[in-house]
């Protein structure tokens, strides 16, 4: 294929980082407190992340990804990783 034949990646669905964290946590059957224990991020910050009140940041994304057993990009770029999240669901 030629370079001009490629299309740029497009989001599959509109999902925020907070919604992604909440969906993954719900799929695991964990409370915010359980996720806090597993990730090392306190439950209040988990709540603020899920409600999109604070930015995720690389370190938090890595901590959450480790807790969920997934790649951090799934959390940091949910609009491009939504297809994977739907498969897990």
Image (spheres, rainbow, N blue to C red):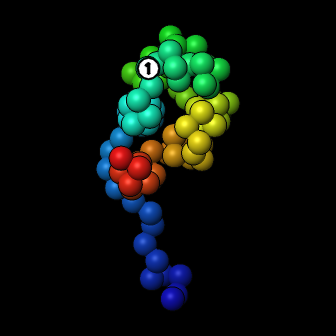
* Res. 17 in view: yes
Q: Is residue 57 visible?
A: no
Q: Viewed as shown, does residue 29 lie left or right of 63?
A: left
Kindly identify the residue that appears in the image at 43 percent across and 72 percent down.
7
> Furthest-top residue in view?
44
Given residues 73 and 70, the one toward you in this image is 70
Quarter residue 61 falls in: top right
The quadrant where residue 29 appears: top left
Name the outermost residue toward the right.
Answer: 59
Q: Is residue 64 above or below residue 47?
A: below
Q: What residue lies at 39% left-to-right and 59% top-to-bottom?
A: 10
Q: Position of residue 65 (x, y in %)?
A: 59, 38
Secondary structure state at the residue bearing disc 1: loop
Residue farthest to the left, as pictured: 13
Q: Front-most of 17 and 63? A: 63
> x%, y% of residue 84?
43, 54
Q: Residue 1, how many percent across, how many down?
A: 51, 88
Compared with 20, 33 (above or below) is above
Residue furthest to the bottom: 1
Q: Position of residue 27 (x, y in %)?
A: 39, 36
Residue in the picture at 56% in, 19% down: 36
The quarter holding residue 53 reads top left
In this orientation, which residue lies closer to the viewer: 70 or 34? 34
Query: Which residue carries the number 1 mark?
Result: 31
Q: Residue at x 63, y 37 (%)?
A: 66
């Amino acid at each position: 294929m030629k370079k001009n034949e490629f299309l740029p990646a497009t989001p599959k669905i509109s999902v925020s980082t907070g919604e992604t964290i909440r969906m993954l946590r719900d799929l695991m059957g964990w409370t915010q407190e359980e996720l806090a224990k597993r990730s090392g991020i306190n439950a209040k910050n988990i709540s603020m992340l899920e409600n999109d009140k604070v930015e995720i940041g690389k370190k938090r994304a890595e901590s959450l990804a480790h807790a969920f057993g997934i790649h951090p990009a799934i959390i940091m770029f949910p609009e491009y990783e939504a297809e994977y999240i739907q498969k897990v669901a």
